[in-house]
Every structure is written in C-alpha cells, then in structure tokens.
Image: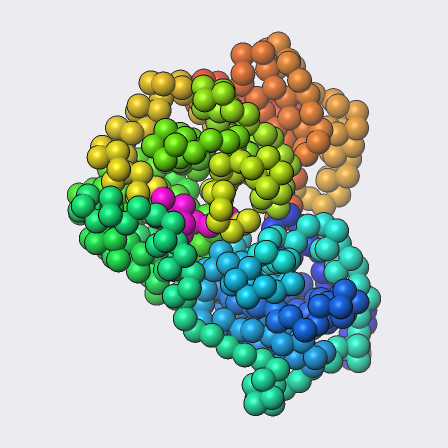
Amino acid sequence: MTHVTTAADIVPISFGTGGWRAVIADGFTRFNVERVAQALADRIHAEGVADRPVVIGYDQRFLSPEFTWWAAEVLAGNGIRAHVIDRAAPTPMIMWTVRDLGCAYGVAVTASHNPAAYNGLKIFTAGGRDAEVEVTTPLQEHANTLHAPDVRRLERRTALAQGAITTQTSMNWYIDAILDAVDLEAIRHAHLKIVLDPMFGVSRTCLQTILMTARCDVDTIHERRDTLFGGRLPSPSSATTFALAKEVLERGAALGIATDGDADRLGVIDDTGAFLHPNQILVLLYDYLLEDRGWHGPVVRNVATTHLLDRVAAEHGETCYEVPVGFKWVSAAIDRYDAVLGGESSGGLTVRGHIAGKDGIYAGALLVEMVARRAKPLSRIYADIVARYGRLEMVESSLEFDPEVKEPLTRRIMVQRDLPDFGLEVRTVSTADGCKVVFADGSWVITRFSGTEPLLRVFAEAGTTEQAQRLVDTVQDYYQLH
C-alpha cells in the first residue's frame, strides 16, 4: 500500500533558546525552512517593513548554502529583498550586517554547536539582536499552519536578475569594526604566537585576518570544510580541544583559540596547554575591562554561569545581574543596565558597544589584547585572578531523557519542589529558569532542560571540583538520572 504524506507526517517547527534546530531530513527539511521564510515574510508585511532587506547567511554545515537560497527565494517571492552573504560566515558577522544595513530582520542558517546531523535557523531583529519569544513563538505557530500552496517563491536566477536577491562575499566591514575596537598597537609590539582552531567552522578568515593584521604569528588547524566536524561536536571544551592544546605546547604559543561551528562561542588554551573554562574567560575579560581599560559598569550572567563574576563586580563597587538561559536575555540586560560585559558558561559573551549577540571572534581578539597589554603569560594572569578573588570550580552534566519523562520530572522539580537533601544550609531556591539551589557557603546547583537539544542539564559550582561533583551526583541519584 502506497503511503500518502499528510500533515501528521510533518515534524513541527519548534523554536528554543537558540533558534530552531532539528535533524536534517527529519524536522529540518526544505519545506519546513520555506514555511518559516513564508511566515517571516508575512510578519514583515504585517509590520510594514517590507522595504528593508533581510540579511541571510550560513555556516559550513551540510546543505546550509542550499537552505539559505531556498529561504531567499521565498522572501523574494513575497516582494522582500533578500541580501545573501554568499560564503560561509560567522553568525556574529551576520548579526553585525543586520545592524549595519538597518534591516528589520536577519536569518542565519546554522545549528551552532549541535551535532553534525542537525541544522537550524536563528532569527535576528532590528539592531542584529536574537529574536525574543514574542517574535519566535508567533513565527513558529504561523509556520506550522502553512501548506505548500501558501508558500510563494521567485526562482533564484530571476530574483538575482530583478534585484530581488542581492549578494555579498566581503567580510571587510565586520573585520574592520573589530580592528577599530581593539588596541592594535599593543598587540603588534607583543610578538605573540597564536594557534587557531575553527573546529571545521567559519571563524578562520575573520580571526586569522584580524590577528595577522595585528602582526601575530598565526597557525591554524582544522580549517577545511568538514560537515561531520571531524567526528566531534563543534563546541570548544576540554574534551574537544586536546589537539589545539598539543599544538600550543609544540609551537610554544602564547595561547590557542577555538570557536564553535558558527563562531559565536570560544574556548581558550593557555600557554601551559590548560583549557580555560568559559567562566574563566568571562572573569578575565570583565576584570581586564575594569582594571586596564578603566571602564565602569555592572556585568550580566545567566543562571548557570559562575558567581565569581559577582565577586569581581563587588570588588569594584558594581553589580552582577542574573538572567535566564538564552543570550537574548543577556543582551537585553546589557542594554537595560549599561553593563560592561555579559555572557554564559557555555562560551558566549559580548561587550558593551559591540553587537547585541555572542561573538567569539571579537572576544578572542580582546583576549589577545589583554595578554599583550599585561605582558604576562595567560596562565599567570589567571593565577593573579585566583589570588585576588578566590577560586570556584564548575561541574556540568548533560543527560538524554525519554520524552515521556519530561512532564512528570518538570512537575516534580518545578511545581512540587521535591529536592534532595544536599547536607548544606540552603540560602535560596529559584525556579525562574530551571531549579537553582544556592547554599549558604556560596556553592550552588541548577537543573534545567536544554532549550536546543533533548537533554537535561545539571550545573554545580563550589570551591573545589570534588564539592561541585557531589552536588551533581546528588541530583542525578535523587531523580535517578543515569
């Protein structure tokens, strides 16, 4: 019997904290991408901003260029000019271009640091911001109601000939903006050797150009396009940067910089070959901007990011603001409080005056500036931080779960507040985003469902790794999450 495809066969579109991500050829299909593009076009017309272009760019993933052009044809078919960055480009560059061209919306075809089987869409609003739920939820709901006859297209060749689709391949404007923002003179005279690891992603051209312009000696690994990302997650961590650490030690480099698949996050290897956790990078850069650049202002972190930032802020008479997971909350708080810096323990950060989203390329350049101006090895710079502010260690765990477990477990944790006995005095319990328990000694643990993958995440921070691990183990044992 021949199977006839029906609406029930179509995997629904679902936006999370980092956009819409789904497995290629399962949920992430040409039809679903076109439905999102049509829903976006309908929204643009309803808002009366169809006279402004929509920037669309893509990463190195499988079929990313093709998905980009299919989305562009739909926008063009709806009388909206699609401005395609027709080369693999960092997500922060796409966001910067949205702001630079005064667009009302932008799109990046990327699944960021997800496994290779995934692709996705990130939607940006005016100013190059991550779209908030007030935008993505209606888009998702409208897109899921659309059928094939509802989607209007203008074929690529015709659209290009008519100017309904325009293209760019230059990255110069974005690169120049970062060059203008860092102290090139200080870097030039430091004679630093840097090793880059784009993790088969999109950062090489931009970051290499910036550092070589500053006269750094730059070596690069994992720079070719590999849609399987070398068989590893394109996410910088201690487990995925061992090759970078080896190169840093063998070449006697000052540091190594790794970026995730779309270059909005970074990981760093210091001069001793040690991996610096994103929490450490946030603390380093916030302290540097306050101490060396003389900036003033608070800092923003999400609920699963180090409280060491709170100590740095307090030392300087500033405030650390806590927000939910999702970088849109970080960027909104930076604006609201005129914060110096904001970031996440997952490796994303941005600085006041730059784009409102994560930028691993700018963060990497700023870190190189810090090493150059302080004229010390990176390991020594962080040792100075520990001597001044103390040490906090984070442990995290990600666990897959069966779909039927999510609702009862959420009810048990979030509604009933059925919490384990940690053997510590509890200071506060918050369910603003997941369930976060803060203890009187300053340690804490949070349990929350991922907004981009079918995972339950547990984060804990304490004075030692062993103490943090005990908090994570207590949660996993109590809820039988093994």
Quarter occupied by residue 139: bottom right
Quarter occupied by residue 412: top right
Residue 335 in view of the camera? yes
| Residues shaded magenta | 358-366
Is residue 192 found left or right of 205 in the rendered image?
Answer: left
Residues 14 and 472: in front is: 14
Residues 474 and 431: in front is: 431
Residue drawn where x is 49% and y is 24% of the image: 313
Q: Position of residue 101 (x, y in %)?
A: 55, 66
Is residue 38 found left or right of 98 in the rendered image?
Answer: right
Residue drawn where x is 62% and y is 9% of the image: 425
Q: Position of residue 63 (x, y in %)?
A: 53, 71
Residue 288 in view of the camera? no
Residue drawn where x is 62% and y is 34% of the image: 323
With respect to residue 239, does 469 lie above or below? above
Residue drawn where x is 51% and y is 66% of the image: 58
Q: Position of residue 285 (x, y in %)?
A: 40, 35
Residues 3 and 410: in front is: 410
Q: Does 150 lie within the magenta span?
A: no
Magenta residues: mostly which secondary structure? helix
Which quarter of the rendered picture does the C terminus lie within?
Answer: top right
